[in-house]
């Protein structure tokens, strides 16, 4: 694990920044794919983990949630509008063959949700904001004191197909509500986060760059 802001640790795939999770205030934010579970548990060994919170219920974010919550005996929080999906009553969205393959490879087991997240809730000192678009219930977590934001896939810090770093609007092949994606990015930019922790990509410490990117969206 690498400390990327005061008390905020980044962990995830062996290849750095490909799929990111964050640990702050006892909470693990996102869990990668189901294959990532053992690695995450190893990285968290010796830490006091009290809850898992998800930005959204996609295979590369919810994958290891069941394993980690079960192993550590801790509750799971996820966006209120995606509880049915997390608990297995609603299928993972797979509108195209790309997502069908991703889903089959990476989706983790269903797991009961202890806390449905809504805008205004607070998790480990981070305020929850509704940023639906990439997924129908997507949320971001923002810590006002120092401007750290855990943003899931509202915006990517790399091109998810090529791996090249840089700000990217998530491609519509992976967006559930493409028409809402730009609004979600603008909403995030309006928070003026000083440290942006992406689901995919290296941490960004350049608020002006995010502001310019959002302003250029149509
Ligand atoms: Zn996603």
Image (cartoon, rainbow, N blue to C red):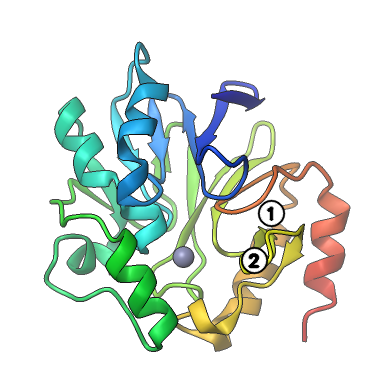
Across and down, in percent, residue 171 comes to 61, 78
Across and down, in percent, residue 200 comes to 59, 54
Q: In this view, does 31 lie above or below 40?
A: below
To which residue does mark 1 refer? 191
Q: Is residue 72 above or below residue 143?
A: above
How dense is the environment of label 1, judged by Cα within 10 Å: few (below 14), some, or many (20 and up)? some
Count of numbered labels shown in the rendering:
2
Marks 1 and 2 in Cβ contact (< 8 Å): yes
Identify which residue, 109 or 203, lies in the foreground.
109
Across and down, in percent, residue 206 comes to 84, 46
Secondary structure under the numbered disc 1 in the rendered image: loop
Q: Which residue is drawn at 78% across and 80% down?
A: 217
Identify which residue, 158 or 121, lies in the foreground.
158
**Mark 2 sits near ligand 1, with its Cβ under 8 Å away:** no
* Residue 68 location, quadrant: top left
Q: Which residue is drawn at 17% across and 46% down?
A: 114
Identify which residue, 138 or 110, lies in the foreground.
110
Q: Is residue 97 left or right of residue 66?
A: right
Q: Quadrant of the N terminus?
A: top right
Circle on res. 202: none
Q: Is residue 100 above or below residue 76?
A: below
Q: In this view, does 132 lie to the left or right of 157?
A: left
Identify which residue, 171 or 192, lies in the foreground.
171
Across and down, in percent, residue 97 comes to 39, 86
* Residue 60 location, quadrant: bottom left
Circle on res. 187: 2
């Amino acid at each position: 694990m690498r400390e990327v802001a005061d008390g905020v640790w980044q962990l995830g795939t062996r290849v750095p920044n490909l799929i990111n999770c964050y640990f702050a205030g006892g909470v693990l934010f996102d869990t990668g794919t189901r294959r990532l579970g053992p690695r995450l548990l190893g990285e968290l060994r010796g830490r006091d983990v009290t809850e898992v919170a998800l930005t959204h219920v996609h295979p590369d974010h919810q994958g290891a949630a069941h394993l980690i919550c079960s192993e550590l005996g801790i509750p799971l929080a996820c966006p209120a509008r995606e509880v049915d999906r997390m608990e297995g009553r609603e299928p993972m969205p797979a509108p195209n063959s790309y997502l069908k393959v991703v889903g089959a490879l990476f989706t983790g087991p269903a797991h009961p949700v202890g806390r449905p997240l809504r805008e205004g809730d607070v998790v480990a000192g981070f305020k929850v904001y509704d940023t639906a678009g990439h997924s129908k219930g997507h949320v971001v977590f923002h810590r006002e004191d120092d401007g750290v934001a855990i943003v899931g896939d509202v915006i990517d810090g790399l091109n998810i197909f090529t791996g090249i770093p840089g700000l990217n609007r998530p491609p519509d092949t992976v967006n559930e509500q493409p028409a809402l994606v730009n609004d979600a990015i603008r909403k995030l930019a309006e928070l003026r986060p000083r440290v942006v922790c992406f689901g995919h990509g290296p941490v960004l410490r350049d608020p002006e760059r995010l502001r310019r990117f959002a302003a250029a969206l149509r």
